[in-house]
Image: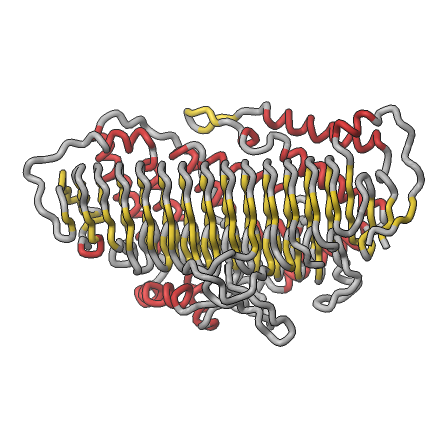
Amino acid sequence: MERSSGCCGSARSNRLLVGFLLAFAVIAVGSPSTMGDTPVTDALSVGNPLASGMMVLLEQEMANGLKTRKIEDKFARFRSYAGLKLDSTAGPRTGSEVTGLCRLSWYDHLMRDSMQAPIEAEQFTRELHQGFLDNHRGLDRVLSIARTKTDCQGREPRTFDAVTSPEQALEAVKQALTGAQVAYNAALAPLNRSEIRELADSLYPVMAGENNVGHTLHRISTGRRLCGLLEKLDRNAVYAAVEALVPLSSPELLEQLGSLAAEDDAPRIEGVAGPIARHLVTPSGNIVIGGRDKNTYQLDKMPGASVVIDLGGDDVYQEGTCSLSRPVLIVIDLEGDDAYQGSKPGIQGSAVLGISMLLDVQGNDAYRAQDVAQGSCLAGAGILIDYAGDDSYLGLRRIQGQAICGVGILVDRGGRDAYKGAMWAQGVGGPLGFAVLDDLEGNDHYYGGGRYLNSYRDDENPTPGYEGWAQGMGEGMRAVSNGGIGVILDGAGDDVYEFDYLSHGGGYWLGVGFARDFGGNDRRLGATLKAYDGGNRTERRFQRFGTGFGCHYALGFCFDDEGDDVYHGTIMGLGFAWDCSIGGLFDFGGNDRYEATGSTTKGVGAQAGLGILYDYNGDDVYKGSGQGYASSGISYHDLPRCGGNFSFVVDYGGKDEYGCRARNDSYNLRSSSGGFLIDRPSRESDEEKEDADEPAAAEVTDAS
């Protein structure tokens, strides 16, 4: 039984809210800023220009709903309870599996301010994407943001000298290498030799190689020990090391490197097949410059080389580990359809206890790896930037923008690209990690899962499917450590996202995750259509926790700025929160279809959760009957102390269809006082009502 009151409040009050939205957005867009000596367009110039104001409107709508139903005190208890749980678990030993190990203060802040958290999430994802659009200056701003979000010291914006000659560009490479080496040594200084060796030997097997489930580690106690060591690293120095490499991503510098002349007496280099243009020996490591024809680089047979620059040709790069034995590695390929191949961890712009950068400027490139690859790190920093071409990325675990204790970034600036991983892939932030995958344009395909059987196979929940843990996940490790910050962003194009369990804009175990697509008609397919190897699935298609969700003291947000989008899933998704968590899905335009039919989907909070689904404009279709459903029962936490469950579905504009049979322009109670399904008219329709009478008194309708 659903209670409907037409349009809650007056048409005039609704119009004032929308007017505030527009004014807020226009003021923000009209405020350009500068960074250093280069003008920077305000971040509101990307995506829907009114998105920021729309989020403020949503906050007002939710606050008014709580006030109208006189449950503000319950929501206040919900917020207070989250704060109490954070306070009581902040120590290293708490008597439970939740501790304060590797906890980030920004995560803590978002959990304590659940109304503002979605607004901050929208701003954060917009600013990140704006940064990546701006080449090296933007990358510098992104790292500055990452510093503050991961409890490192902030810093002033930097300016960059112009690079006007090939030799000046080469000198900049030498300086970057030296700066990274010095800062890397400072990062390890708080650790003694045995601790450094323990990290070098154990990080990969314990954090990646031994595992086939995503929610925890095979060796839990060893994982806790390693996370304790990671907390001792000087992470400010880690950022300084990767910031030393930022100038190398300047298009002007890369163009000048392309004009380097070959030397007649360049020697043959072990591990290199093909022409060598130059070989430079420096105190910080050797620099190998390959010629313009095809080369094959067996990078691990070149242990003295810290920098490889290739001037052209369709090249092959084999392995290329960055680790304690070679702590800084820079690879710059300026031209050609290149193949990057390997099976060792810490390759292709990735590192295990190191600092790595891979820049590929032109060509249709293929990246093939297994674990800890393609812009990934375990303690350190890994950055991969591909500037152009139709590229493909393939790996297994902890790949494609993944970070534990450091920074993992993959940026693809153009082309139709394909990404495939089996677990912990495509923007996954583990403990003390800041991880981002941003694809700036093109019709792209993302795949996460399809290989390892899901770990939710207890007697009570024998659900089928595969592990996913992909596409914008802030992922803690249960009974081991708190999670980090994981982000997936896509700038434009009609994109397809395939994913399995716990994927796509989600947080797990005291982590926070974000997904945002800024343009195009997109399809989010939970679960994957085929198995990881391309064959038929051995498991029935079933996806659990996806598309803007939080699970176990976590936060997850998914945003889509425009386009006619399709959202799939099975249970526990599409703006879903479970166990003292916050989850939200926010779509700012287009005729969208929310296809998941499970009762725990589409703006649902459960076990003291806040779930939100917000759609602004468009003729939308909501399958199933679970929209905004808020159960009155909680078994995980004490009622009334925890406040209850809070579920919001808010839809503005369009002629919408609801599986629960709610009407357009209606205000519905969904199961309990914390359940809201609010359908508002479009701004144009509302303006037509400016002189209309107040709506009729509330009536009770059956929308079940």
Q: Is residue 381 visible?
A: no
Residue 140 vs 472, above or below: the answer is above
Residue at left 85%, top 40%? 8
Say which quadrant the C terminus sits in. Answer: bottom right
Label total for image: 0
Quarter of image, res 510: bottom right
Given residues 680 and 328, the one toward you in this image is 680
What x and y, as percent, mark residue 629? 76, 55
Q: Residue drawn at (74%, 27%), measured in percent from left and top? A: 19
- Which residue corresponds to the image point at 45% horizontal and 64% vertical from the top-left? 451
Where residue 634 appears, x then y in whole percent?
Answer: 75, 65
The quarter of the rendered structure image containing the N terminus is bottom right
Q: Left or right of 689: which side holds 158? A: left
Left or right: residue 84 versus residue 685 is left
Residue 226 position by quadrant:
bottom left
Q: Residue at the far bottom: name it.
A: 459
